[in-house]
Amino acid sequence: MDLALALRGAGHRVAIYSPRLGHFAREIMARGVPVTNRIDRIGFVPDIIHGSHTIAVLPGLIRFPKAPAIFVCHDSSSPFDAPILLSRVGAYVAIDAACVERLVVDGIPEDRIVLLPNGVDLEAIAARQNFAPKPVRALAIVKASPNWIQFVETACASAGLELDVVGPGVGRTVGDLPERISRADIVFAHSRSAVEAASSGAAVVICDERGFGGLIGPDEAQRFPNSPLGRRIFQEPVTVAALERAIAAYNPDDARIVCEIVRERLSLDGVRAQYEAVYQRAMAEARPSKVDSNSDDAELAAVTAGWMVGSAEFEALHRRLDAVASQEATIAEWFDSHAARMLDDPRRLSLGTNASDLVRFLCVKGWSYPETWGIWSDGPQAILRIPASLVRLWGGVRILCLHAFPADHDEKDTRRVCVIIDGGPQDEWAFANPAKAGFTSKTLRFPGRTDAVQVAFRILDPVDTPAFDPNPRRLGMGILALEAPGTTS
């Protein structure tokens, strides 16, 4: 939105296409830039396609086969940011150092990659004049998983900080983020949100569900983008101790210096001018005489087919999965009686990406792929099977879990899950607004049981993922870990 408005202000004709429109679309149109989710409704041939996210770029490249393009990579791991290697893509832009590395690994020649960070609208986010000698107010911006917020809440409470938590990750999207940033002395965030906060003069602690990057000081700001301010993956986990050290290191003079560096280097006007130069380069590099149309068409067709659920690639994948499932059925029976001896810590089983491969045998049906923090249910019902050896060892199970909420939900809303044990007794769990509740624990008891137990979760209030998701999911309950009741986490 900011870049489109800046380009329009510089005299360019701009139109925006997105497969899915939200409230920002209305705001952009109200300010004079047309926005549509129908690619056929763009009534002019652009001089350049500014493409971001593969699934959105494809229709534009097909609709305007003669238009040169640039591809902007915003994420170092998301499949939506996988680049399309075409002759008429004259430049590939990476917003940080991690994205540069991703483009290189994905096969883009280094001489076609431009490092160009996101810019900050300095008119919307003013630099504060007064810097608190001691932090009083804090803001956390949660874009995805909220599994780190509990540590921020504890650290802020210990330091006596008043904490405000916002973002789609906690179901609290706000329209006054610049004002909230200006009121906060410390902001916990990453990526563009961190840059915006730094430009206001707030002290910024880099963290999200993927790790902890520390308090940004003048040295880190000078090294940008080769600093935590410009990276998305961090080796250190988010912990209360690390956050407390960062809060204790608050220095108003350092915050002022970081603010000046960011505002000098990352203004929206400066970034807009750099994009104009990239557009000129792309149009020169991808002029008709230099484009291999046959190769481009073949690559475009292959990429498009890969995003279609009915493609041969998907059918082959399902055949492989069916074969694996039949093998795992036999393995699961053996695992049922040996699990307690085979697991590193049979008292607590993490379900995230770092979990033991053996743990997947507990996830019988209806679970999505593991993420860093854990797994989501995927569909109207999901089933866990607690092996007999763990039933005997535990006598029950404590489940560390949460529920997905739509971005626009009422903060007083609750979400429900019906829990069924071996097809018999039923219970109903209610999950409160995650902005306040986050992860919670629920305990099931299996008195006197010695055999395996099957627990089914019927999702009564599922949340649909965006329409443009190539693998649509109906998110419901998320599970971080399974524990023996009474375990100290």
Image (tube, rainbow, N blue to C red):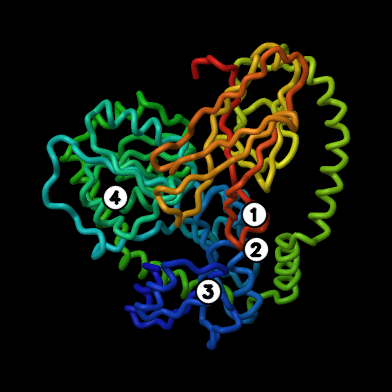
- Cα distance between the residues tagged 4 and 3: 28 Å
Spot occupied by residue 363 in the image (x, y as percentages of width and height): 71, 33
Mark toward the viewer: 1 or 3: 3
Residue 464 position, x and y percent, is 59, 55
Label annotation for residue 85: 2
Q: Is residue 431 left or right of residue 193?
A: right
Under circle 2, the secondary element is: loop
Of circles 2 and 3, the one toward us is 3
Q: Please name the amino acid that badge 2 sits on.
A: Leu
Three-letter amino acid code at the position of disc 4: Ala
Q: Are marks 2 and 1 in contact (CB under 8 Å)?
A: yes
Q: Alpha carbon of mark 1 to alpha carbon of mark 3: how far?
A: 27 Å
Give the distance between the C-alpha atoms of the residues marked 2 and 3, in whole angstroms. 21 Å
First reached walking from the N terminus: tag 1 or tag 3: 3
Q: Could you tell me which residue is drawn at 55 percent across and 74 percent down?
A: 37
* Residue in the picture at 64% in, 54% down: 107
Residue at image location 85% in from the left, 31% down from the top = 329
Q: Closer to us: mark 2 or mark 4? A: 4
